[in-house]
Image: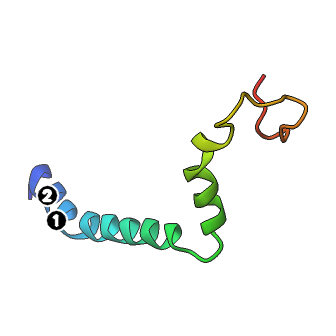
Amino acid sequence: MDTYSLMREFADSWMLLFLVLVFLGVILWVFRPGSAKAQRDSANIIFRHEDAPADPTELDPKEVRE
């Protein structure tokens, strides 16, 4: 059996199975319990300082970039 046929058989069977499992794992990770708060925060980040620029003294230290 040449290398091409061996690699093709591997890709057709085990790699396909691996990629399907990774895809399902990502889907489960996104919809896991407790992730709604983080997703909501990420979705609303562009509206956080909509009316005026942020006051540096009121910002959470995690938000400040130096």
Judged from the image, the secondary structure of the residue bearing numbered disc 1 is: helix
Residue at 58% over, 59% down? 39
According to the image, what is the colour scheme of the structure? rainbow
Which residue is pictured at 45% across the width and 65% down the height? Answer: 26
Amino acid carrying label 2: it is Arg
Question: What quarter of the picture does the C terminus occupy?
Answer: top right
Name the residue tied to disc 1. 12
For this rendering, which residue is in front, 29 or 14?
A: 29
Q: Name the mark on residue 8.
A: 2
Task: Work out which quarter of the rendered image holds the N terminus and state it.
Answer: bottom left
Q: Position of residue 60 (x, y in %)?
A: 84, 41
The percent position of residue 37, horizontal first and vertical second, equals: 66, 64
Quarter where residue 41 is shown: bottom right
Q: Residue at x 79, y 31 (%)?
A: 64
Q: Position of residue 31 (x, y in %)?
A: 51, 73
For image coordinates 20% across by 60% down, the residue present is 11
The amino acid type of the residue labelled 1 equals Asp
